[in-house]
Image (cartoon, helix red, strand yellow):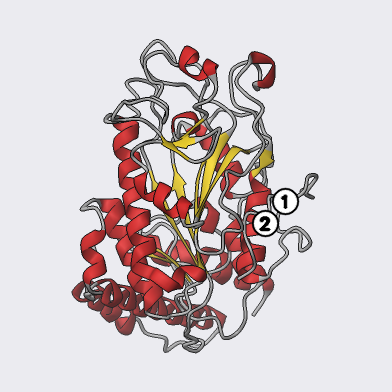
C-alpha cells in the first residue's frame, strides 16, 4: 500500500466513516481496531473542558483581598468570615471556594482536590476559538499544529494490543484535544442497537468482488467501519447497565448523566486510559449570578456531578484523575452588566486520590493593578502545559516534555508537584 493510501486510511477514515455512515452525527469517529481485548484497572485521565471562559475569581475566591469586593461591587461573594448564608467555603488563609462547590470542599479536606490558580496560556488572545485551539492542542500561538495533545499522547504510546475502548467520548463531536490520527470512539446523540444493526447491514451488503488496490482500500474501510460499530454497541451496552446505588447520587442533568456513564465504563475494566467531556455555557458577560444565577447553577452541577463520580468510583480514584479547565479567566473588574469580560489567567482543578498535598497550587500576586496582566486580568503564572505534562507523567509515567509532545515547550519553572506518581 502506498504512502498516500496509508495517510487516507489513517487520517481520513475516522471523519469519513463517522460523518457519512452515521449520517453526520459523528464528525470524527473511531477507526476501531479489533486488536485484542486488553482489560484491567488502568490509570485513567478524565478531562473536562468548560467552554466559554469560566470566571476563575468567583470560583476560587481570594477573600482576604480588599480589592476583590471593591472591583466587584455586585458580583463579589461574601467571605467565609461573614455570617452570610451564602458565604464562600474557606480553603486556607487566602482562598475560599464558591459555596456551590461544597463537594469539592469536602474532597479538598480529604486531600483529593487541588485548586490551581493563575494558570492558563501564555498567548495573549482573548478569542474563544483561538484560545480553545491553543489549549487543546497544547500549542499556544501555533495555528499550524492541528492535532490535540491527548491524541498525540495516545499516538506516541500506542501498541498493537491497545484495547478498543482505550479512548472514547460520550458526545458526537471529538473535543479538539482528542482529534488526530489515533482512533477515538465518539458517541452519536441517539444510539441504539437497532440503529447499529442498520449500519452493520450496510457494511455487509457492500461487495469486494473486484480485485485491485481500490478494492483493498475498500476492504480496509469496511473492516474499520464494522469495528467502529462493534465499539459503539459495546459502549451502548455498558452505559445501559445498572451500576447500583451510585447512580442515584448524580444530579439529574445531562452532565451528571455523562459522568455517571463514564464511571460505568471505567468500572467495566475495558482498559480505558483517556476520555474527555465538553461542558458549554461559561461565557457570562451579563448577570453572572455567582450564587444562584448562571455561574452558580453551573458550578453546582459541575461540583455535584464530579463529587458523585469520585464517590461512585471509590478506591478506583487512586488511579483516576479528573482535570477541569477553561480557555481563560475573566476580567478582575466586573462590567456594567453585572458580569465579566474575557480575561487571561484562570483556574483549574485536579480531583483524585493522588493529590500530593492539601493546598491551593500556583503563584498569587494580589489584585493591585501593577500585579495584574495589562492592569485588568489575573496573570498566567503557571503555563497549562506544565499541568498537562505533570498529569500524564504522574498517571502513565510518560515524560511528555522530553518526548516533544508539546511543541516548542520546555518547562522554565519548577513543576507544581500537585500529584504523586500512581
Residue 236 visible in this rendered orientation of the protein: yes
Task: Quote the CA–CA distance across marks 1 and 2.
Answer: 9 Å
Q: Return the residue at label 2.
A: 389
Q: Give the crowd class for mark 2: few <14, some 14-19, many >=20 residues within 10 Å.
A: some
Q: Is residue 21 visible?
A: no
Coordinates of residue 119 in the picture (x, y in percent): 61, 39
- Which mark is nearer the camera, 1 or 2? 1
- Which of the 4 quarters of the picture holds residue 101? top left
Q: Nearer the viewer, residue 151 or 263?
A: 263
Q: Are marks 1 and 2 in contact (CB under 8 Å)?
A: yes
On the rendered structure, is 313 left or right of 131? left
Q: Quadrant of the C terminus?
A: bottom right
Q: Residue at x 29, y 79 (%)?
A: 200
Q: Considering depth in this image, is 302 or 33 the residue closer to the camera?
A: 302
Residue furthest top in the image = 336
Residue 49 pos. (x, y %): 46, 47
Quadrant for the N terminus, please. bottom right
Q: Say if 287 sits above or below 147 in the image.
A: above
Residue under the image location 51 percent in, 64 percent down: 353
How crowded pointer 1 is (Cα within 10 Å; few <14, some 14-19, many 20+) is rated as some
Left or right of 269? Residue 292 is left
Q: Nearer the viewer, residue 354 or 12?
A: 354
Residue that badge 1 annotates: 415
Could you say which disc has been placed on residue 121 in the image? none
**Element at label 2:** helix
In the rendered view, tell whether residue 42 sits above or below residue 354: below
Amino acid at each position: 500500500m502506498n504512502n498516500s493510501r496509508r495517510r487516507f486510511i489513517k487520517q481520513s477514515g475516522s471523519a469519513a466513516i463517522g460523518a457519512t455512515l452515521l449520517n453526520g452525527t459523528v464528525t470524527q469517529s473511531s477507526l476501531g481496531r479489533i486488536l485484542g481485548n486488553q482489560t484491567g484497572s488502568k490509570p485513567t485521565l478524565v478531562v473536562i473542558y468548560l467552554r466559554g471562559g469560566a470566571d476563575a475569581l468567583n470560583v476560587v475566591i481570594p477573600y482576604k483581598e480588599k480589592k476583590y469586593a471593591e472591583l466587584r461591587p455586585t458580583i463579589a461573594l461574601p467571605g467565609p468570615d461573614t455570617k452570610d448564608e451564602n458565604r464562600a467555603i474557606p480553603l486556607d488563609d487566602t482562598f475560599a471556594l464558591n459555596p456551590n462547590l461544597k463537594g469539592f470542599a469536602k474532597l479538598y479536606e480529604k486531600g483529593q482536590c487541588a485548586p490551581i490558580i493563575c494558570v492558563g496560556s501564555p498567548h495573549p488572545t482573548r478569542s474563544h476559538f483561538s484560545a480553545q485551539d491553543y489549549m487543546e492542542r497544547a500549542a499556544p500561538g501555533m495555528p499550524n499544529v492541528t492535532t490535540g495533545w491527548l491524541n498525540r499522547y495516545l499516538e506516541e504510546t500506542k501498541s498493537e494490543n491497545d484495547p478498543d475502548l482505550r479512548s472514547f467520548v460520550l458526545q458526537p463531536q471529538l473535543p479538539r484535544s482528542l482529534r488526530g490520527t489515533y482512533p477515538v470512539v465518539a458517541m452519536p446523540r441517539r444510539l441504539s442497537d437497532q440503529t447499529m444493526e442498520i449500519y452493520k447491514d450496510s457494511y455487509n451488503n457492500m461487495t469486494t468482488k473486484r480485485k485491485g488496490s481500490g478494492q483493498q482500500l475498500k476492504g480496509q474501510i469496511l473492516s474499520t467501519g464494522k469495528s467502529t460499530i462493534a465499539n459503539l454497541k459495546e459502549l451502548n451496552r455498558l452505559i445501559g447497565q445498572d451500576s447500583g446505588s451510585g447512580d442515584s447520587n448524580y444530579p439529574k442533568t445531562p452532565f451528571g448523566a455523562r459522568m455517571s456513564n463514564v464511571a460505568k465504563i471505567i468500572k467495566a475494566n475495558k482498559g480505558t486510559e483517556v476520555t474527555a467531556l465538553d461542558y458549554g455555557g461559561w461565557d457570562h458577560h451579563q448577570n453572572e449570578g455567582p450564587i444562584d444565577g448562571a455561574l452558580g447553577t453551573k458550578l453546582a452541577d459541575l461540583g455535584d456531578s464530579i463529587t458523585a463520580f469520585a464517590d461512585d468510583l471509590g478506591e478506583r480514584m487512586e488511579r483516576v484523575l479528573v482535570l477541569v479547565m477553561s480557555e481563560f479567566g475573566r476580567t478582575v473588574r466586573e462590567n456594567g452588566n453585572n458580569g465579566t469580560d474575557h480575561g487571561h489567567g484562570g483556574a483549574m482543578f485536579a480531583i483524585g486520590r493522588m493529590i500530593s498535598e492539601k493546598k491551593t497550587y500556583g503563584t498569587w500576586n494580589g489584585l493591585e493593578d501593577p500585579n495584574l496582566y495589562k492592569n485588568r486580568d489575573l496573570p498566567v503564572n503557571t503555563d497549562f502545559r506544565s499541568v498537562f505534562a505533570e498529569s500524564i507523567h504522574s498517571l502513565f509515567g510518560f515524560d511528555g516534555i522530553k518526548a516533544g509532545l508539546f511543541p516548542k515547550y520546555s518547562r522554565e519553572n519548577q513543576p507544581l508537584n500537585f500529584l504523586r506518581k500512581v
